[in-house]
Amino acid sequence: MGHMDMIDKSDFYEYFKKNRGMEFSKEEIINRFSKSSEDEVEIERFLSEMEVESTYSPSNLFVTCKAGTVYYKWNEST
């Protein structure tokens, strides 16, 4: 099957790092990375995990919620 190109959380961390200082909504990330509805479910799960991780462990990933939309942003600790 076409699971060769499976993405994992590290891909998202890399993406946020590369675009540090930029803010992305959850929808934007899902649209950018998903190729199918299964992808969407998987990505949604990754993002939720990342959201929880950023809350409970020190992380450069900054997750905020504005008007019901979740945003992700990489803040380099300088």
Image (cartoon, grey):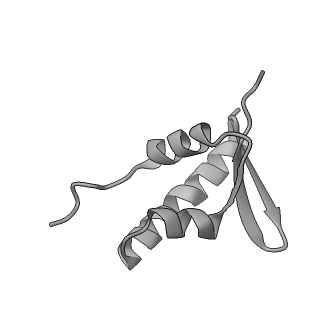
Using the image as rendered, state which of residue 49 and residue 8 is in the foreground.
8
Q: Quadrant of the N terminus?
A: bottom left
Q: Residue at x 75, y 70 (%)?
A: 69
Question: Where in the figure is residue 75, as x and y percent of width and height?
Answer: 74, 36
Q: Residue at x 53, y 45 (%)?
A: 15
Which residue in the rendered view is the most extreme toward the left?
Answer: 1
User: In the rendered view, does 65 fall on the left or right side of 40?
Assistant: right
Using the image as rendered, state which of residue 3 and residue 45 is in the foreground.
3
Which residue in the rendered view is the most extreme toward the top?
Answer: 78
- Taking 58 as reference, is 34 above or below it? below
Using the image as rendered, state which of residue 70 and residue 31 is in the foreground.
31
The tally of labels here is 0
- Taking 12 as reference, is 59 above or below it? above
Question: Where in the figure is residue 11, as x and y percent of width and height?
Answer: 45, 45
Question: Where in the figure is residue 14, as x and y percent of width and height?
Answer: 51, 39
Q: Quadrant of residue 39?
A: bottom left
Q: Residue at x 78, y 21 (%)?
A: 78
Using the image as rendered, state which of residue 30 and residue 38 is in the foreground.
30
- Taking 30 as reference, is 75 above or below it? above
Which residue in the rendered view is the most extreme toward the bottom?
Answer: 37
User: In the rendered view, does 1 fall on the left or right side of 49?
Assistant: left
Question: Where in the figure is residue 42, as x and y percent of width and height?
Answer: 43, 65
User: In the rendered view, does 72 fall on the left or right side of 39?
Assistant: right
Q: Quadrant of residue 62?
A: top right
